[in-house]
Image: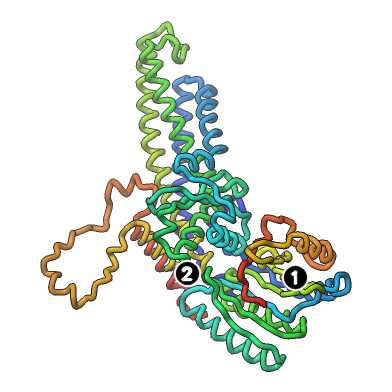
Amino acid sequence: MKFLDALLGRSKPKQPKLDALFGVTGAAITLEAAAGMRPTGQAAVCFKPASGQGFAAAAEELHDLLELAVKEAGSTVSVTDDRYGYRWVVLTDPEMEDLVTSVHLVNSTLEQYGFGPQLLCSVFAFSTPEGQRFHLVYLYKRGTFYPFAPLGGERRDNELELRVKATLEGDLPIEPELGRWFALWGLPLG
Amino acid sequence: MARTRFAADAGLASRMVLTMFLLGLLYVVFVAVLVALKIPLILVLLIAGGFLFFQYFFSDRIALSSMRGREVSPEQAPELHQMVDRLCALADMPKPRVAVADSDLPNAFATGRNQKHAVVCVTTGILRRLSTPELEAVLSHELSHVAHRDVAVMTIASFLGILAGFVVRSSIYAGAYGGGGGWGRSNDRDNNAGAVILLVVLASAVVYALSFLLTRLLSRYRELSADRAGAILIGRPSLLAAALVKITGEMGRIPTRDLRAAEPLNAFFLVPALAPGFSFSSLFATHPPLERRLEQLAQLEAQLGRPA
């Protein structure tokens, strides 16, 4: 069908893969046991807001659902738009499982309204025993994870990233193409 | 569960299939004519195939050097790279190379035979004129060209035109040299050879003209497809529409003047009676008219407005 789609000049919006996301809970345990790296309790979902009433309705329901979930679990939520026009829902909760559940809530709400293709990535923040921050990024369209360790001045700590990759290879589907380990400068996580 | 909010455009796809079918039919007829006239077909195909091969494999370099584009690294153009990075992650495609051309004309293009060899190039003129979200819309349009493999499709589609043009030229040369060295089969009957060459030239010229029109038509459909896919990718069709309006320099269509201030003057304006109908220039255009593109984007925008 790929050939036919190319011939007809049509590409279907890529649907997100949501299942692998739950593997991040196990990965957090592995990271702590093997390297002493702990989650900071912060996570974020990044998506591209669409125009129109359809998306506005989805966003409203998302807001209400998150508010409810947050009250129940005792976590906090905030929303920011970055300068590239993507929206970040930032969640804070000391419990990794609650974080993953909240992230999934955002996913399933958007998907339910037909905006699944708008999902870009989810990010979970971790820190090394020395206090250096790094992030596990989940690519929805690939269903894979990759580590992103920003240093100052738009540089990346590739050594740490490759170490995290080696540690997690058994737990999570790690993105095999290094060219897709996109940088996310200025992401709104502490 | 709604997978996507956008309905498939069956009309566009079927018109494109029809165009390709006509192009293919023309191709078959042309080859049949050549065979009937006893032209050494292998030779013609080989040379024309060589052109095609060259164009196909070097399309990225040809286009880049003709536009004087230079590739930029993430350090040289961090914002541009970030935008392309994210769009590629959103669309799940490998990242193309990114280039910038020093030109004040607001323009952007994508080229390369497949996703691995693709280049997306923008001019400095477009970088200056468009806002960040508008530029992103233009990039997603260009990335859609890459995803649809438009370079490959259009190169193959234009093969017939190259072939026919080549036959015209070589037949004229063969005629000029008295049919002696030319096709070499009817040396003994010079009169006959002259008539054959004339026929070949005529047939090829007609084929060339028809294939030219059809490839242009196909190109316009591909543009509409890329508009559609690009707008769906960023989820905001009107952004692409705004960028198109700006690029085509027709921003003047949306006046910034207050209605009340402009009204007394209206009596003196001669509104040009532009009939939105058929015109010859629209047959030769590689891009559909702005109205047609904006109309499609407006339809997509309307689909977004519907409640779930």
Q: Residue at x 70, y 68 (%)?
A: A137
Q: Is residue B5 above or below residue A10?
A: below
Tell me the amino acid under the disc marked 1: Ala
Rendered location of residue B280, percent (x, y): 28, 46
- Identify the residue position indicated by label 1 in the image: A20
Q: CA distance from mark 1 to mark 2?
A: 29 Å
Q: Residues within 10 Å of mark 2 (few under 14, many from 20)?
A: many
* Chain identity of mark 2: B
Q: Residues within 10 Å of mark 1 (few under 14, many from 20)?
A: some
Q: Is residue B90 above or below residue B125?
A: below
Which element is circle 1 on?
helix
Q: Residue at x 27, y 69 (%)?
A: B255
Answer whether residue B49 is visible to the viewer in this image.
yes
Answer whether residue A11 is visible to the viewer in this image.
no
Tell me the amino acid under the disc marked 2: Arg
Q: Are marks 1 and 2 in contact (CB under 8 Å)?
A: no
Q: Nearer the viewer, residue B290 or A48?
A: A48
Q: Nearer the viewer, residue B206 or B283?
A: B283
Rendered location of residue A78, percent (x, y): 60, 84
Q: Is residue B3 above or below residue B47?
A: below
| Residue sitting farthest toward the left | B268
Left or right? Give the position of A48 relative to A135: left
Residue A40 found in image quarter: bottom right
- Identify the residue position indicated by label 2 in the image: B236
